[in-house]
Image (tube, rainbow, N blue to C red):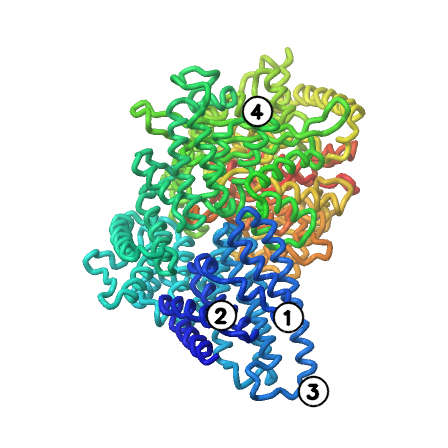
Amino acid sequence: SEVVESLISTLKRLLCHSDLTSATECFILLQKAYSFSEQPEYLLCAMIDFLSVSSKFEDLVTIVHDQFDYEVFLSSESIDSHFNSVLHLTSQIINESAARSAVTQELENMLRQTCESVDEEMEMESESTDDEDTADSAMFSKSDLMIQKQLFVATMLLLHAKLCLDAGQPASAVKYLGWCRIQCRKILRNLRSASCRSNSVSLDDIAIQVDNMLTMCYERLAVAFSLLGIRRKAEDHALMAVLKQKILNTDCQRLAQINIQDLIDLIERHDDAYIVPLDPIRSLMKVKALSTSDDRMVSQEILVEHDECAIDFGLDDRTTRINRILCKSKNALAYDDSFWRVPCFRAKHYLFINRVYRELNHCASQDTTNTMVPMAYLMRRAGVELKLRIYRDPGSGQFDTASSDKSTTAILKEIIDSRFGSGMCNAEAYYRLGLISLSKARENGELQILWNEHAIVAHKEFTGHADVGDCDSILFSTLEARTFFQRALTSAPPASFNLTKNILRCLALVTGPNEGQPEPGLITASLIHISVGGSARNIVQEALGEGEVKDSFQAFDDELLDHNSKVEAVGLLLKDSAALIPSNWNISTMAICPNGEVLITSLRVSVSSCGEKFAEISTACIFPALTTHNNDSQLGIHADVLSPLDKIIERSQKQLHGMTEDVQNEQYNEESSRRKWWKERYSIDEDLQSLLKYTEMTYFSNDPIRQKLIPGKLFTSERRNGSPSNDDSSECSDFGPGNLASKFEAAEREPSESTSNHQDFDKDGERSNLTKLTKSKLTSKLTSFGVTEKNVKKMRKAELIDLLLSEMENSFLSDILEEATLIAENHAHSTATKEAKLTQEYPCEVDEGTDEPCTILVLDEHLLRFPFESLDMLSNMTITRVPSLPFVLATLLETKSLHSVATPTVDPRKVKYLLDPESNLSETASILGPALQSIASKNGWEWEGVVGRMPSSEFMSQALLEENGLYLYCGHGGGEKAVSRSQVEELMTGRDDGIRRCRAPIILMGCSSGKLQSANMYYEPEGIALSYLYAGAPCVVGNLWDVTDRDIDRYCLTLMEDFLQSHQSDTLSPKSSLSLAKCVANARRACKLRFIVGSAPVCYGVPVVCSPSISIDS
């Protein structure tokens, strides 16, 4: 007993000083000492100390478990049965990875029961404390034993959270860590009670231990949330872990106040890890670096001591030297994870990693007796991680490549065969082996054969097996790559992690559209869907309670399912979604593979002859173009489309930067300066138009691709007519400049003898003539069209010309309006007759809301910044966006549970608007305020608005929570100063029925209000528009980039008029209303700059229609 007590005391002191080597040696001695003891209290204490070592030094978890003798503890009858069961399940998790899922679920239930059991015992003990006389000579009082059991439970939860992180299950880790924090707080609360004190237990020691456990909870929560892609929570917990240790300056309470160089200096000063615990600092450094933009990171001068001769590993005894080497290896890995984007840092860091790796190998080779001794194990594990970093491809561009050099292949296989690599390490090694096989399949033509008629090559259509070279009928390289990618997924983190995204997309690429799948394209489509929007799914799933909505999110990321089961579950969800999704919707998902291939999958709902709805799934691939100079160099959509788009938007942003009303009046009051400014503006607009045309012609003009983007009925009609199809089933109201053109286009689609002779309006020629006129003459011409002189008095000449051109074009169109309207009405009558007949044949479609064909885009983290809605083939269609398919299903499920139909609706009487809350856009407020009031008053609607000041919290709450309401914001950005993103996301929870609380569609008419961005693409792009979707908003309209206020004001008024009055028809049927998404497309014609402004507004969510059941006083 004296030996055990002495070792326990020594172990605790070593733990306090973070002496890894001595602590593990002391633990081995302690375990031997326990074998001579028969006192049950020692057995429980032994478990506590054992778990303390494992959780304190997380790298020791597996190896110490392997050395630990469970039988000693399981054979003791004095230990509670719950504890025995937990221990037994722990050993099963370590030793039986095949049964990990089932055992983990059983362990979770057992831990829950153990927590409840300990809580009940503690409560009973507190009630009976006054009646008990505890003997001072007893080594443990009953209350002391209860605290030890609580420590056991908390430490076991902490340990299993680490095991979940190692297994790539961060969501489970978050759950365990949440329980652990609860247990730690209970312990601290009980320690404050005098009944918990005793002579044998040091209150301070237990409090310090619990406080350290809380620090580890925060640190591991930061790791878990980082893997889940939830950036803000990762930052908050990483900062909390460091603040609890009181390491940083107390003034640094926010991540933005912390300097990366300060963290590096702190690590370098205390790299012996004895005085300052460095793991929280390393974690915070990584989180801070991953939250910093690429440009800012490159501009920062990262100073780390990389002089190979100056690296000090210590010249003392071997133990001290090993500790220093292990600490340096952790630093090297942390630096590599944090600063791989800094080119000047990477070259020096490569030498640093090499030096540390050589030292590790040298020390490990000196001890060949037992590679499973803790120190040797840790050295070899660190060596495997460093080896992977050394031979990782040094390029960190958009395309993730792998060298096919034989030596690299051999090294990757060595890493996989090693017993010391982590799951993440093995996943990356398998992934890089897969890239090598994939490169061979690409070179020898196997991929083209696999995809056959389901693929195109950019700049030319690929058909059949032409020009693919000599290739065996068996696709050996493709099969080999598929095997490697499947193995990589077994130990990979969730799909929110970039490595896992790439593995999933590469696996989809080598799986192909048909081969080896129970249904054509189902497995490939499931893989593509899983790879897109993982972070967004995790954010919502983490907040939601149990229910049907959460199930739709969880199917994509269920950690208890293996890879095959998860793909099967997603495939089943895709097929089952046919029962909920309207048959005129098309859900198109696009993702870019690491080497530039674009994968597209389409989910449509078809109706069988017997009226039964079923899912129709198909996939296609766009192979990147090869340059003419070097056939091995691939352009891809990144360099061909996205980079030019970024440059165009950057030009626009630079021109608009700092452009306030005062600056505009001061710097552009002269005609020449205004003309120069507008010339650049039109140049940007034309460049974007050219890029859109080039993109459509190069990548999306062929049938295999168009079919995935255009709704089925429209695509069939387009193929039949031989021309691009517009949405001819809907008519626009007479408000706004886009509506007249819509009727004219309907007439053009079915030309008659009387309309075929009309000439197009020569806009360029008329503009040239008008430019020669003076401002007064332009004003005079405008008055002839009914425009009052007062309204144009302050307008510039360029604006007068644009307005006059618009009026002249409308006048030109009015000459053929009667014929066009007649044709459109005849066509609408014919369409209605066909739809009525279809409804009689297939009654299951009656309650599907609007009749508009709709395409819902699910875009990956790279493509979501591109304005697909403005491609010519999609410009007149109803297009929306969502981060992932579950967002569509969740909105439809929630709406259907509250109403009779799944399509969300807006009551035009329940509109609330916020204009210019920062009071610095006076012109916007003066134009939109009266206009909105005019729309409301002439229809008898009582709208509530706030103009020129910040709204109250009550106003914002009513605006966002009102069922069937509509919230309009016009001001700077997305209105975050009125309601922050965190406040919006709090609306994900709070209702008793489990439905998310934000019920109103949102229109955000501010600069970049719909822009989603990421600092460096480690995290998926995010923004205020997504926050509203998370909170339950069925639809969010926002701008992808900055826009000019006058143009977007015109757009906003046209949008509101078209949408809120589109339901005024004789039928008053839900199907007669235009959706908000359709009005977003129609209103683009109101913009002078059709592309740089008109292409900015996009619609997130699902189509929302204006309620036709409201009586209108016109």
Q: N-terminal of the two: label 4 or label 1?
A: 1
Residue 603 coordinates in the image, percent (x, y): 61, 31
- Residue count near mark 1 (Cα–Cα under 10 Å), binned few <14, some 14–19, many ≥20: some
As drawn, the label of residue 58 is none
**Is residue 460 shown above or below 1004?**
above
Residue situated in front as seen by the camera: 272 or 925: 272
Check disc 1 and report the residue beneath it: 118
Identity of the amino acid at label 3? Asp
The CA distance from mark 3 to mark 4 is 80 Å
Residue 1031 appears in view: yes
- Residue count near mark 4 (Cα–Cα under 10 Å), binned few <14, some 14–19, many ≥20: many
Q: Is residue 175 left or right of residue 403?
A: right
| SS of the residue under disc 3 | helix
Identity of the amino acid at label 1? Val
**Is residue 384 shown above or below 24?**
above
Residue 923 appears in view: no
Of tags 2 and 4, which is closer to the observer? 2
| SS of the residue under disc 4 | helix
Q: N-terminal of the two: label 3 or label 4?
A: 3
Q: N-terminal of the two: label 2 or label 1?
A: 2
Identify the residue shown where x is 45% and y is 48%. Answer: 423
Of tags 3 and 2, which is closer to the observer? 2
As drawn, the label of residue 707 is 4
Residue 1111 coordinates in the image, percent (x, y): 79, 42
Check disc 3 and report the residue beneath it: 131
- Residue count near mark 3 (Cα–Cα under 10 Å), binned few <14, some 14–19, many ≥20: few
Check disc 2 and report the residue beneath it: 35
The CA distance from mark 2 to mark 4 is 71 Å
Identity of the amino acid at label 2? Ser
